[in-house]
Image (cartoon, coloured by chain):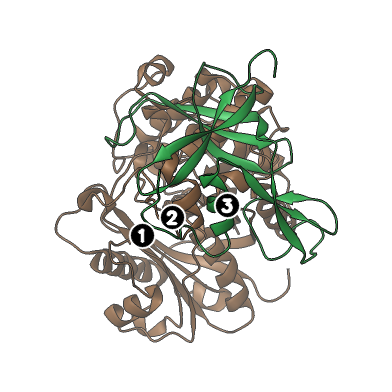
Chain colours: A green, B brown
Amino acid sequence: MTDPTGAFGDPLHAPFWDAARRHELVVQRCRSCGAHQFFARLFCLACRGEELEWVRASGLGTVYSMTTVHRQVSPDFAVPYVNALVTLDEGPRLLTTLVGPPCAIGARVRVTWKERAGAPPLPVFTPVGESG
Amino acid sequence: MTGQAVYITGVAEGPLGKVSDQTELSMMGQATRAALAEAGLREADVDGLFVRYRTTEPLVEHTVEFGEYMGIRPRFADSTDIGGGSFEAFVHHALLAVAAGRCEVALLAYASRQRSRRSRSMLLAPDDYTLSGQFEAPYGILSPIGQYALIAARHMHQYGTTPAQLAEVAVAARRWAQRNPKAFVRDPLSVDDVLASEMVSSPLRRLDCCLMTDGSAAVVVTTAARSRDAAKRAVRVLGAGESHSHWHISQMPDLTVSPGVVSGREAFGMAGIRPSEVDFLEPYDNFTSAVIMHLEDLGFCAKGEGGPFVEQGALAPGGRLPAMTSGGGLSYNHPGMLGLLLLVEAVRQLRGEAGDRQVPDARLGVVHGIGGVSFGAAATVVLARD
């Protein structure tokens, strides 16, 4: 899908959305202490170092919490749907949507991508199978 | 605490509920005149202005516009926004400003017509330049119910807190509201009623969520000398504290711990009191689950024990910790930001003028405000009858 808007995202997060177009989930990594972080900053929140790079995350994580939305407030979001916080294996936590089979807090999930009109693909998560 | 003693000498509600014949400015003005009358003061005495309000106008400098409306020219002005608990932070700031002599009569005011204006949207607006617009709005999270639902779900998972325990909080608030003629809803309410109400964003049901009303209030904070002008008993501000930790829910360090831990510790420490000495609590009850966390974070019980704590009417009239004594945001009024109305109720309890809902021999009260769409800010005030 071509993105008619061209550049997308604020100046700090444009690399995130560029990677999303390739279906790659990226987070910042500190070259000094190795900590991963998201949202992006010009410094490392852990050690205050200023050399940061975008690295591809494994795309795997664990459901930290989840809520099922039952009230429909917009035609854009058909209920029920599940909002969740997923803690990536690298450390950062993302607000997201869970798709696929039902799961619970503590479940292992992996990233997948929801295509959007007029915007880059959106990372959502789905339970990993037995094979992980 | 350093500096001179500081008192609340006037409180007032302005119009509440559904207000079709006034503006936010006029509502605040009406509340201000009533609060100043209680304090035995006039507009010309006010030299500190602490104001926030909710309009649909995006560009408003709050103390400036309200100062113009009232004809007040302060020498100390503060429009801090840490959400609904901003007013507890205002008391903290006013306490310091008055004690330091930077102002003598501090006026706090608030109003909102969010109900009449239908100005509240449950969805965040997507965009490609804000963090929330890029990374929250596209997921359709109901805000702030969704963030608080994620917090409540984690608390349940980690500590076994139950939907019935959440419902106990709503029932306690309603039992207080039934004793308050100004409460927006006063119908009888049972735990089963709460559990049968519409699921909005699990585990939060409609009756776990606060009201959306219009409302307004004003509070006067001043010196011991000026407190002698007051028509009613002055209430001393013994301590105050505030903190914040995050804005976006993904950045909340631990979903089961709020910055109320810090604001409570600061306020209780400044006042030199312990939770066991507190006669009543006015907690920011935007959601039932939040009240359970407030009890833990302020030290009324251990972390994880808030659910069992609220059982058997512990927060209701006659309970071991009377809380939400006006009926709270759940049943009295919740005009977008509740914090100032919590202070009004606490002062009335400490004056012994709360009528049918009076807590017997109330001498020490705690007001705990919070803010942020993700439980990210908190401010706590300790008030005492002298």
Which residue is depicted at the point 58% across and 77% down? B98
Residue A26: x %, y % from top left: 64, 47
Q: Which is nearer the eye, A16 or B112?
A: A16
Say if B237 sits above or below B124 in the image. below
Q: Are marks 1 and 3 in contact (CB under 8 Å)?
A: no
| Image coords of residue B123 (percent x, y) | 36, 44
Numbered disc total: 3
Question: Left or right of A64: which side holds B64?
Answer: left
Q: Nearer the viewer, residue A99 or B43?
A: A99
Identify the residue at horizontal 27%, vertical 64% (top origin).
Answer: B24
Chain ID, mark 3 = A
Q: Where does label 1 land, which residue? A: B217
What x and y, as percent, mark residue B117? Answer: 21, 53
Q: Please rate how many residues cluster around mark 1, counting C-alpha atoms within 10 Å: few if below 14, some from 14 to 19, many from 20.
A: many
Which of discs 3 and 2 lies nearer the camera? The answer is 3
Of callouts 1 and 2, which one flags the residue occurring earlier in the amino acid sequence? Answer: 1
Q: In this rendering, is residue B19 above or below B47?
A: above
Residue that label 2 marks = B344
Expressed as whole percent of the image width and height from the top left, the position of residue B258 reads: 64, 45
Q: Residue furthest left?
A: B21
Asked if labels 2 and 1 touch by Cβ distance under 8 angstroms, the answer is: yes
Q: CA distance from mark 3 to mark 2?
A: 48 Å
Mark nearest the camera among 1 and 2 is 1
Residue shown at 55%/49% (left/top)?
B248
Q: Residue B92's image quarter?
A: bottom right
Asked if badge 3 and badge 2 are on a common chain, one would say no
Instruction: Give the labeled residue for mark 3.
Output: A16
**Badge 2: how crowded within 10 Å, few (<14), some, or many (20+)?**
many
